[in-house]
Amino acid sequence: MNTIPNGLHHVGSCIRPPSEYNAILLQATLGCSHSKCTFCGAYKDKTFAIKDRKFLEDDFAFASRYCTHQDRVFVMDGDAFIMPMDKWTWILSEIKEKLPWVKRTTCYANLKSIKMKSDEELAKLHEMGLKAVFLGLESGHAGVREAIQKGGTPEELIFHTKRLRKSGIKLVTIVLMGLGQIELSLDHARETGIALTAIDPEAVSVLSLIPLPNTPLGQAFEKGEFKVPDDIGMIAELRELVKHTDLSRGAFRSVHASNYLSIDAKFPQDKERVLKTLDNALAGNVELKPEWMRGL
Ligand code: SF4
């Protein structure tokens, strides 16, 4: 167990969404309970575990003294949402009592962890202060989801994320372009757009696949067995995704460093403008990010 200089108990790398850059990073779990997605290189150094209360008690004591200017808490690691209700209710009560200035608590979730909570439990978590979850949705295409071992069908994904939305917990979805390879590129984009439209999340964050050598997908890519679309292929895929994504009121962003083109839009009002930009990019009239500038 390392104690990083800010005094919170952190083990290994701390991964959080860009928007939570100033949050108090409360590491209540280690790793990811799923740990099977073929493209994912995160948490390879960790076995999934729920941390003991005593570490968190120390973290709350430290944060109550030294983190008084941070009004967000991000509960780590990869799918902290999977913690049982008694642990979650304890954490949210502690935040309320020890860190009363905190306005927003969030965490990563996956389909399995949402599925394991009843409607009443979701509502209770929201009422106690869990404001939003970040879900690695990746794809709404059944075959792609199976190939990447994401777990769960598109139907289950839509059903359980809608339950989550009804509870009041906000949903930020992360989708990954390139997972359908060249062959299923447009199908992956279209089915993902259709799923997003059905779910209607508060925000969609698009990333573009960069195969990592420490993953099964990366190893297949190196052997030439997994074909990633090139820059123009990725833009065509993104256009298909945008075309099929209708949000009643949500953010649509591709601002992550892995993308060839940065989009920061609000749907529905910006959708036509985004489609025009992507058409211009496909016609060669918009400069795309060079390969060397892409990163995770
Ligand atoms: S659920 Fe998320 S953290 Fe876990 S293996 Fe899949 S992508 Fe990685």
Image: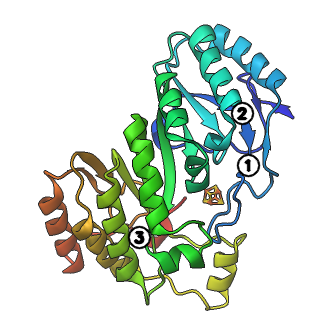
* Disc 2 residue crowd, few under 14, some 14–19, many 20+, Cα 10 Å: many
Tell me: is circle 3 under 8 Å from ligand 1: no
Q: Which mark is residue 242?
A: none
- Quadrant position of residue 77: top right
- Cα distance in 3D space between marks 1 and 3: 32 Å
Q: Nearer the viewer, mark 1 or mark 3?
A: 1
**Image vertical order of residue 293 relative to residue 122, above or below:** below
The three-letter code of the residue at mark 3 reads Pro
Q: How many marks?
A: 3
The residue depicted at 43 percent of the width and 56 percent of the height is 159
Q: Is residue 52 visible?
A: yes
> SS for tag 1?
loop
The three-letter code of the residue at mark 2 reads Ala
The three-letter code of the residue at mark 1 reads Gly
The residue tagged 2 is: 28
**Image vertical order of residue 101 relative to residue 250, above or below:** above
Quadrant of the picture in which ligand 1 is shown: bottom right
- Cα distance in 3D space between marks 1 and 2: 10 Å
Q: Which mark is residue 31?
A: 1
Q: Which mark is residue 290?
A: 3
The residue depicted at 35 percent of the width and 49 percent of the height is 201
Q: Nearer the viewer, residue 128 or 17?
A: 128
* Mark before the other along the chain sequence, 1 or 3: 1
Tell me: is circle 1 under 8 Å from ligand 1: yes
